[in-house]
Image (cartoon, helix red, strand yellow):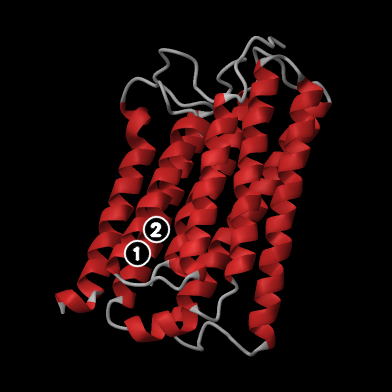
Amino acid sequence: MNQTSTWPRPCTRVYLVLIALTFATYIVGELGLSGLTAALLVLAGALFKGHLVGDFFMGLHGLRGPWRWVILIWLLLIGGLITTAFTLASPSTT
Amino acid sequence: MSTAVSAPAESRYPPGDLAIWIFILAELSVFAVFFAAYAFTRMNQVALFNEYQLTLDRGAALINTLALITSSYFVVRAVAAIRGGEGRSCAGWLGLAILMGGVFLGVKGYEYAHHFGQGITLSTNTFYMFYLSLTFFHFMHVILGLVILTAVAFKARQGGYDAQDHIGVETGASYWHMVDLVWLILFPLVYVMR
């Protein structure tokens, strides 16, 4: 195995970011933060985590063509739907 | 082996058999409908959803999220190992990934036992209907993913893959990452966002 690679490996860096964002999400829950802003921030973090998994774990990063974007499109689709539903459910919009 | 996570340069197709990616897209579409149904149903029952969300074990969900992310990371290392022609190392990483998947099943099973022990069912209320059906649907995907990873790990241990021929490892890995990806959305949506 070639040992000339930098440490930590790119996949390890991505893994550490995923772990950090997961703890951040958990802390938001434990603090009982509610409301549209908190919910959408948590959602944004989740979508970013999903993007990292798609790009760097599933190996879509660097692809050419439509397969490069399938996970990102899925994330944007569900992100848009969930954002719409939570925004419409927010007291300030009713 | 510096990147370990990217598809071969200039490739137009994702790692693994293209058929698994068609399957993955179908699965993701179903989960998207589930997520949207949860969010839009919640619109008319915000108080109920917020009240019963507090009854969920967020600590268990944290452990499960960490377990799945770690498992996915081990699978990435397994793919990197087999691309380097290291079949036994690949099998070892997959074994660790399977172990983490087992942790997920154990913790989720503990959660279900707790809920069922309290008499909670799909009929209890709309929140629990979504919680139980969404998480159990995902739970079944974890089981299927573990079956796939176990089969791939055995074959890798027996020398069934090498640096040139390892599409089976990449196919199993892609499916497992999809299982992880879905949970990364499910966890905040059901356990945290309110």
Q: Quadrant of residue A93?
A: bottom left
Residue visible at 49% across and 53% down?
B184
Question: What amino acid type is highlighted by mark number 1?
Answer: Ala
Q: Quadrant of residue B149?
A: top right
Q: Is residue A59 above or below residue B9?
A: below
Residue furthest to the front in view is A31
Q: Tag 1, which secondary structure?
A: helix
Name the residue tied to disc 1. A38
- Residue B44 seen in render: yes
Name the residue tied to disc 2. A42
Residue visible at 26% across and 55% down?
A80
Does residue B125 appear to the left or right of B70 in the view shown?
A: left
Question: What amino acid type is highlighted by mark number 2?
Answer: Val
Circles 1 and 2: CB atoms closer than 8 Å: yes
Q: Where does residue B153 sit, x and y in percent of width and height?
A: 76, 34
- Residue B187 seen in render: no
Does residue B75 appear to the left or right of A61 in the view shown?
A: right
